[in-house]
């Protein structure tokens, strides 16, 4: 299985990806828990360029190219080999983040994002979970986390609101693959909702 977690910054994707990977491991599966941008050595180097620094560091077009480069390395070095070996991959973000962040919320680049994905990536998760919650609450969570990886949180609440709208629209357009999960409540409660759907 190839499973991705998506949603706005601070909605709990990393926690839920980890909890699901741990649960699948406990069932005896071989599972790779990974993240984007990142997940392979080259992609982790690109990650620093994307998630640190000023909000205006890159144009949406440049971000799209950087994310695609990182994703290509991730797919080549981890995702495709794991799936070919019959193993499972759980990732904290994948292509849907680029579709929403650069394709809709930052700019109108949906056609560019889709063309690059078809040309360079060519794989979709079997199931995608969009964790949905109030953008103000998620932004407060993300800001409280601290650290240097806060470039997108620095774009403010209106941007997070556009992201939420984008993820919900994407889920509506791809109901066979994407499930929207209520991300409010305890981590265990959210994990139970995910397992029920999976």
Image (spheres, rainbow, N blue to C red):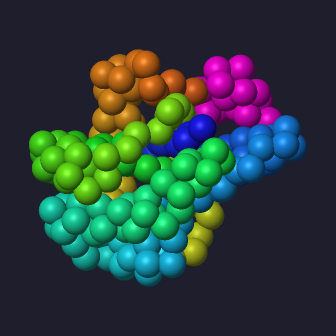
Toward the viewer: 24 or 7? Answer: 24
Image point 84% across, 43% down: which residue? Answer: 28
Query: Dividing the picture into quarters, in which one does residue 33 lie?
Result: bottom right
Image point 74% across, 50% down: which residue? Answer: 30
Relative side of 149 to 165, left or right = right
| Image coords of residue 105 (percent x, y) | 25, 46
Residue range highlighted in magenta = 182-198
| Image coords of residue 35 (percent x, y) | 54, 59
The verdict on residue 188 being magenta is: yes
Majority secondary structure of the magenta segment?
helix
Which quadrant is home to the N terminus? top right
Toward the viewer: 112 or 138? Answer: 112
Query: Dividing the picture into quarters, in which one does residue 181 lie?
Result: top right
Relative side of 140 to 155, left or right = right
Image point 77% across, 43% down: which residue? Answer: 29
Residue 136 at least partly seen: no
| Image coords of residue 76 (percent x, y) | 43, 63
Which quadrant is home to the C terminus? top right
Query: Dividing the picture into quarters, in which one does residue 19 lie?
Result: top right
Image point 45% across, 26% down: which residue? Answer: 177
């Amino acid at each position: 299985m190839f499973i991705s977690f998506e949603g706005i910054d601070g909605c709990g994707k990393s926690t839920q990806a980890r909890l699901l990977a741990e649960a699948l491991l406990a069932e005896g599966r071989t599972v790779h828990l990974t993240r984007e941008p990142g997940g392979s050595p080259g992609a982790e180097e690109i990650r620093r360029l994307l998630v640190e620094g000023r909000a205006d560091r890159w144009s949406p077009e440049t971000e799209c190219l950087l994310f695609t480069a990182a994703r290509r390395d991730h797919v080549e070095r981890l995702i495709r080999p794991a799936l070919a070996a019959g193993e499972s991959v759980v990732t904290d973000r994948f292509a849907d983040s680029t579709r929403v962040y650069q394709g809709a919320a930052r700019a109108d680049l949906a056609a560019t994002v889709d063309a690059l994905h078809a040309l360079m990536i060519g794989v979709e998760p079997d199931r995608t979970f969009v964790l949905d919650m109030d953008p103000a609450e998620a932004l407060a969570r993300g800001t409280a986390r601290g650290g240097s990886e806060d470039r997108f949180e620095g774009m403010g609440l209106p941007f997070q609101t556009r992201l939420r709208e984008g993820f919900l629209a994407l889920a509506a357009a791809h109901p066979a693959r994407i499930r929207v999960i209520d991300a409010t409540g305890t981590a265990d409660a959210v994990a139970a909702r995910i397992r029920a759907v999976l």
